[in-house]
Amino acid sequence: MTDRVPFIYFHRIIKGKYYVHWPVYVIGEDKINNMFIVQADTVSIPKAENVSDSAVDEGRRRYITVEVIQRLHQRTFREKVLAAYREHCAICSLRHRELLDAAHIIPDNEGGEPVVQNGLSMCKLHHAAFDQNIIVVNPDYRVEVREDILQEIDGPMLKYGLQKLHFQKILLPGLSKRPNRGWLEIRYEKFRKVG
């Protein structure tokens, strides 16, 4: 801490998978709770000519704090959700990890918790359709497609990628990791109001 020597911080996501932060510095000590206070660092933010060093440091500190909280939460959530669904899209069973996301049933900004039961493993197409209320997963674990989308005529992606999913049952993880039916009901009610 005194010498400002950086170290590597391994944040455990799931067994055998870690998110690596570097550089991380010890910036303080909490003797009462027998803990250290650490700060993750990033590349310096360029300083404009008319901005003071303290303003840059404050802006940089806020950026770093937000970045670390967001990354830890999002990556941890994604890894746990994808592991629960054995790296498949719950909607279409696509198994290309680079094309999979962890979709929140109840979004963060609406109080959704970063737990597997609040997540669905989805390919990027179905995640975007879910976020835009084009599709929803109802409390019976079936996909519903918005009525106007069902009536639309377009190419094969619309027909086979969305419309044919209507009332299809989703791929489910083990019982303890299944989507929370109460949260699905809340999301479903929102979908019905939009559609």
Image: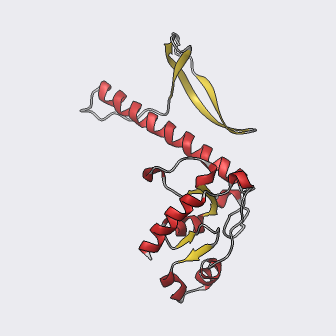
**Residue 184: percent from left, percent from top:** 56, 62
Q: Residue at x 66, y 52 (%)?
A: 81
In the image, residue 166 above or below residue 152: above
- Residue furthest left as drawn: 50
Left or right of 174? Residue 30 is left
**Residue 18: percent from left, percent from top:** 68, 37
Q: Split into 4 quadrants, where in the image is the C terminus?
A: bottom left
Instruction: Depth check: give the residue in front, 62 or 30.
Output: 30
Left or right of 99? Residue 38 is left
Q: Residue at x 43, y 51 (%)?
A: 109
Instruction: Depth check: give the residue in front, 57 or 65.
Output: 65
In the image, residue 160 above or below residue 34: below
Q: Residue at x 62, y 28 (%)?
A: 9
Left or right of 168? Residue 112 is left
In the image, residue 20 above or below residue 173: above
**Residue 36: percent from left, percent from top:** 54, 17
Q: Residue at x 64, y 69 (%)?
A: 140
* Image-quadrant location for residue 73: top right
* Image-quadrant location for residue 194: bottom left
In the image, residue 181 above or below residue 1: below
Instruction: Depth check: give the residue in front, 179 or 24.
Output: 179
Q: How many marks?
A: 0
Q: Which color scheme does this rendered protein use?
A: secondary structure
**Residue 62: percent from left, percent from top:** 39, 34
